[in-house]
Structures are given as structure tokens and as C-alpha cells.
Amino acid sequence: MARARAPVPARSPTRAWLWAGGFLGVFHVGAALLLVPRVGADTTVGLYVAGQMTAGLLLDHFGLVGVPLHATTAARLFGAAMVVAGVSCSCGAREGTCGPGRRAMGAAPWNRAPIWST
């Protein structure tokens, strides 16, 4: 059985943004591997969403990378602030897991008492 293979391109992509996806993907996976054990999955996902909201607001406001301009309204800023507030609440809900120099590396999550029981 013969396999058909796509020909190898003669030139590699030269635009920086074409390579950015691979590097950002590696950064994303590495950051998730480091953050989830320390701050929890909910805070990690919340931080990613907050970062994406911020990037989206900046892209829309300044029309970067060919995105059509959209005004940054008070409602859009309020929505982004609510996402950041939600991450702050999620992060602060577990004592000692957030902030500089603190880690959540104590007992396994299934061995800890629920937050609401204290």
C-alpha cells in the first residue's frame, strides 16, 4: 500500500505571526502545567479567560492585526472587570494558595476540608 505525502515546502513561513502560534502554544501548555498544581484549575482557567478578554479589548480598540475597530465602551470594560473580580474571588477562596511566595502544595485536594465547612 503506497502512502501519499504532501511535498515539503521549499520555503518556511517568514512572517513572525505565523510562528507565534507554536511558541504561544508551548507557553500555554507549560504555564498550565506549572499553575494548576499551585493555584488550582479554576484560577488557571480564569486567568486565561481574563487575559483573553484583555487582549480582545486591546485588539478591538486599536484595530491590531487587521481587526476592525470597535469602541471600548463602559459596558465592555465592566464585563472585563467582572471577569477579573471573579478570578480574584476564586483565588482568594482558598487560604494560602495565592499571592507572592505562597503555594498550594499541602495535602491533596481530596484530603482537605471543604472551604465552606470552617
Image: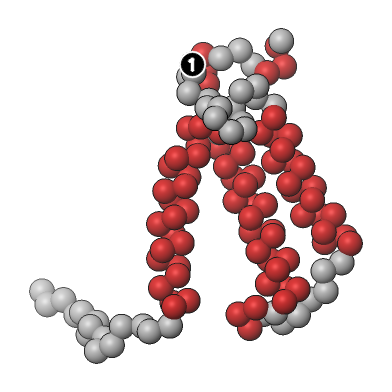
Identify the residue shown where x is 87% and y is 66%: 73
Q: Is residue 3 left or right of residue 24?
A: left
Q: Using the image, determine if residue 64 lies above or below residue 96.
A: below
In the rendered image, which quarter contains the C terminus?
Answer: top right
Residue lying farthest left?
1
Q: Give x and y (percent) for residue 7.
A: 22, 85
Give the residue pinned by disc 1. Answer: 107
Which residue of the protein is positioned furthest toward the front in this rendering?
Answer: 101
* Image location of residue 60, percent across then percent down: 72, 73
Q: Quadrant of residue 57?
A: bottom right
Q: The residue tagged with tag 1: helix, strand or loop?
A: loop
Identify which amino acid the numbered label 1 is placed on. Answer: Ala
Q: Quadrant of the N terminus?
A: bottom left
Residue at image coords 57%, 42%: 44
Query: Viewer-proximal residue, 40 or 96?
Result: 96
Residue 101 % position (x, y): 54, 30
User: For the view shown, which residue lies furthest in the right direction?
Assistant: 74
> Residue, x 41% and y 63% (percent of image)?
23
Give the colour scheme of this rendering: secondary structure
> Which residue is rendered at x = 42% and y = 48% of the image?
30
Residue 54 position in % (x across, y down): 69, 60
Position of residue 48 relative to residue 68, above or below, is above
Choose between 4 and 63: the one closer to the eye.
63
